[in-house]
Amino acid sequence: MKALNFVLQFLLFLLLFSLQKALANGVTPVEARQLRDEVREMFYHAFDGYMEHAFPLDELRPLSCGGEDTLGGYALTLIDSLDTLALLGDRERFTSSVEWIGKNLRFDINKTVSIFETSIRVLGGLLSAHLIASDYATGMRIPSYDNQLLDLAEDLARRLLPAFDTPTGIPFGSVNLKYGVDEHESKITSTAGGGTLTLEFGVLSRLTNDPIFEQLTKNAVRGLWARRSKLNLVGAHINVFTGEWTQKDAGIGTSIDSFYEYLLKAYLLFGDEEYLFIFQEAYSAAMHHLYNDPWYVEVNMDSAAIVWPLFNSLQAFWPGLQVLAGDIDPAIRTHTAFFSVWKRYGFTPEGFNLATLSVQHGQKSYPLRPELIESTYWLYKATRDARYLDVGRDIVASLQYGARCPCGYCHISDVENHKREDHMESFFLAETVKYLWLLFDLAVGPDNLVENGPYKYIFSTEGHLFPATPQISLLQEHCSYFGAYCSHGNLKEDPCASDKSADSQETNGNRVSEGRVRTEFPLDSSSFESSPVSGLIKGLCTGLTHAQKYGISYPASVDAPSEDDSAKQNDNVAQGHAVVVFSDQIANQSLSGDSNDDNVKESSEMESEREPERDPSQS
């Protein structure tokens, strides 16, 4: 361990030195404007290439100038690009694209699709574009638009719902859009796959006034969190029927990354304190067990023993998430370390071994991922430090000279020799170019929907824009809709009292986990500001503690209970957790003094060999 620490510290010194050299020639305001225009041209080079050579297939083959269906065969790249067109102010292209999708897209097809990818790319793309096209305040309102994208989004989401029919509430990884879940479908899914659905499904519930979408995805998060280890860590893969972890490697990258991301963002967008509570506990555990300043490692979720001293490219979203959480200092150090890998190779490989300081075998590719660029944007937004413009300039140069192809931008199959592959993921237009453009537009004086628009926006894990409008962000006036366990037991509009007294015993809005997590979000004047929850949100029941509001029980001891304590413990408590999440039914019964042993869900764990890394298309 000492040797590893020495290597990491030595590498950090070299990286800081190389970065200081790179900062010798900073980006001037004139150059920032030129870079913004260059990024805009990059988008249209790829978008026009897709529309001319691949549309209506899913994705572009930028070397051969062809197309391929990769997800469902429904113009994936066009859907993923809609809000980027709006962000760039391209009213003509945005309008024609929305109209084509409304007239031609249908989901009644015999296709088995990924729940995760379909939700973040297609459902998120449709919802974001709907919110822009239907609102005069965005400046991109389409006069002829009549909720066609929202109708498509609801139809799609209902076709995904059969995947949630599992004993744990954690969904299957795939579903057939016409026939539901196949009887031979794998019962193993990733933590990110089950825990990265709350934003899209939650927004859909708010827009359709149907709580089923939000309830199911929230229950999936509860199902994962209830099965965490005693260290408050989650593994990478889980059996959705038994709740057993089939891969116990805990980290912030492959197969887990956006689980953390959506905990915080669901709180920011919806104001639901339960997500904040879970995020604070999960983030504190990650910083304690995974953080090896400035890097992050993968550990066994039970023992915290290091299993992989590896930087994988999906970890690069983390500094951006830390900015949203107000934890700036470690975000700066980690971003510096991650960018040093980019500087070394011109791109970030899927895996970089921190012990050997070399590209991990079998993980040499760069599939145009946006995560490092995303964190660069957020750190510049938070600090206005010009070094992040220099980072952006270097990334643009790498993409232009290493990845640009005749009809778009190519995957890099090997970062050591820059060999190109004939494929362009849709997220290149949804995220990679979007964050680059926002970075430089912010530098020259922003003139876009995100920075100057009527709403504050939360970016989904696919980079889609969800506005904090009153319809989306204000809690409804009935308790059980958001898991506040009043005695009503139904979802009718039955207002609860304001929560002034209920929050008198807690300060979740200012809670600090190990001195790190804050919710003030200290960005600039245009960024998020914390707002008090008490007295503003009706949906929390008066007189209840935080634990009672959310059906969470805090056993006095779970490690070594005495015989007397064991005899007294309610059978509903799943052993082995410092915090236990109950089902809605159990929580309601517990408040009334009743119990039902049939509702007990026990969590067991089993060791397994490390499974293959997550599909590179999961961003």
Image (spheres, rainbow, N blue to C red):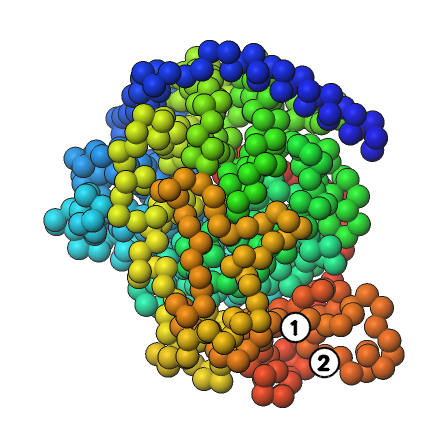
Image point (35%, 40%), residue name: 80
Above or below for 418 versus 543? above
In terms of depth relative to the viewer, which is nearer, 224 or 272?
Answer: 272
Assess disc 1: are there few (<14), some (14-19) or many (≥20) residues with their C-alpha within 10 Å of its C-alpha: some
Q: Is residue 331 visible?
A: yes
Q: Pointer 2: what residue?
A: 570
Q: Residue furthest left?
A: 143
Above or below for 238 versus 433? below
Where is residue 470 shown, x and y percent of the image? 31, 60
Q: Are marks 2 and 1 in contact (CB under 8 Å)?
A: yes
In terms of depth relative to the viewer, which is nearer, 427 or 330?
Answer: 330
Q: Pointer 1: what residue?
A: 553
In terms of depth relative to the viewer, which is nearer, 162 or 357?
Answer: 357
Where is residue 336 shown, x and y percent of the image? 58, 26
Assess disc 2: are there few (<14), some (14-19) or many (≥20) residues with their C-alpha within 10 Å of its C-alpha: some
Above or below for 598 versus 238? below
Identify the mark nearer the N-term, 2 or 1. 1
Image point (71%, 36%), residue name: 292
Foreground tag (2 vs 1): 1
Image point (73%, 26%), residue name: 8
Q: Is residue 85 left or right of residue 585?
A: left
Quarter of the image where the N terminus is located: top right
Q: Is residue 453 left or right of residue 306?
A: left
Image point (41%, 79%), residue name: 496
Residue 605 position by quadrant = bottom right
Q: Amino acid at mark 2?
A: Asn
Q: Is residue 103 visible?
A: no
Callout 2: SS: loop
Callout 1: SS: strand
Where is residue 580 shown, x and y percent of the image? 66, 68
Mark-to-mark CA distance, 2 and 1: 10 Å
Q: Amino acid at mark 1?
A: Ser
